[in-house]
Amino acid sequence: MERLRKKDAEAGIEEKRLTDDQRKAIAEARNVYESRVAERRIMHQSTMLMTADPAAAAERESEYRRDLERFASDRDRKIKEIRERS
């Protein structure tokens, strides 16, 4: 870790400590993401059990993956916004 800090200092990258409020906000963003993923997983499993057509199942799987990617993207964007706040 010390080597990485030294390398960052040489590159001119400033280390910022997170405030307690920022830590709480980041934890909340992660919790929201995890709950959305859990809810979507349950819905996906339920839908897949009722889907007999392979083409429809593939489409549902594709939708599920897209939703997971969107959730992760939203989470990462929100965390980045929190970290950038002063």
Image (cartoon, rainbow, N blue to C red):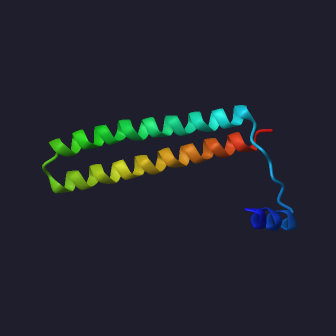
| Front residue of this view, candidates 43 and 11 | 11
In the rendering, at what x and y percent does residue 3 appear? 77, 67
Residue at the image position 46 percent from the left and 51 percent from the top:
69
Could you say which quadrant of the image residue 45 lies in? top left
The number of discs equals 0
| Front residue of this view, candidates 77 and 83 | 83
Residue lying at the far left in this picture: please name it: 52
Figure quadrant of the N terminus: bottom right
Residue at the image position 56 percent from the left and 43 percent from the top:
75
In the picture provided, is 57 more to the left or to the right than 23?
left
Figure quadrant of the C terminus: top right
Could you say which quadrant of the image residue 36 lies in? top left
Residue at the image position 74 percent from the left and 41 percent from the top:
18
Could you say which quadrant of the image residue 14 lies in? bottom right
Residue at the image position 82 percent from the left and 59 percent from the top:
13
In the rendering, at what x and y percent does residue 61 appear? 30, 52
In the picture provided, is 47 more to the left or to the right than 13?
left
Residue 25 against residue 5 in the figure, above or below? above
In the picture provided, is 46 more to the left or to the right than 70?
left
In the picture provided, is 70 more to the left or to the right than 52?
right
